Image: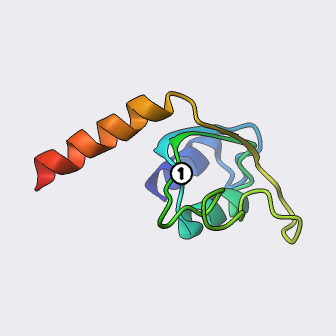
Amino acid sequence: MLLLRAAAAAAGNYRLEDATVYVTLEPCVMCAGALVNARVKRLVFGARDLRFGGVRSKFSIADSDLLNHRIEIEEGILAAECTLLLQAFFRQRR
């Protein structure tokens, strides 16, 4: 959400039609909906979120035919590395 707000402020428009968002983990339903509302063009993510994924794993919000905007999705980029990075981060937090 903070990323989308900052990008919209920098662009002077909430529509981020030429933006590509890169994330390590598949966005949740709320974040996928925010990406659709911001009209993000493309989403690239590494690892799937098998519990809460809103783009591929549990739901298909970002490219649903039911919505007025569909995001191009590329998944699995450096998936193993992203998974290890997230596991290490949360291991440190515990």
**Residue sitting at x 32%, y 43%:** 86
Q: Work out whether residue 20 or residue 87 is closer to the camera in this orientation and state it.
A: 87
Q: Work out whether residue 8 or residue 72 is closer to the camera in this orientation and state it.
A: 72
Label 1: state its secondary structure.
loop
Q: Is residue 37 above or below residue 44?
A: below
Q: Residue 44's image quarter?
A: top right
Q: How many labels does the image show?
A: 1
Q: Work out whether residue 85 or residue 5 is closer to the camera in this orientation and state it.
A: 85
Image location (x, y in percent) of residue 78: 50, 28
Q: Work out whether residue 33 or residue 8 is closer to the camera in this orientation and state it.
A: 33
Q: Residue 66's image quarter?
A: bottom right
The C terminus is located in which quarter?
A: bottom left
In the picture provided, is 3 more to the left or to the right than 37?
left
Image location (x, y in percent) of residue 19: 68, 38
**Residue sitting at x 60%, y 59%:** 57
Return the residue at label 1. Answer: 26
In the picture provided, is 72 more to the left or to the right than 54?
right
In the picture provided, is 24 more to the left or to the right than 74?
left
Image location (x, y in percent) of residue 36: 71, 60
**Residue sitting at x 47%, y 66%:** 51
**Residue sitting at x 77%, y 44%:** 17
Question: Please, what is the three-letter code of the amino acid marked with disc 1?
Answer: Glu
Image location (x, y in percent) of residue 67: 84, 68
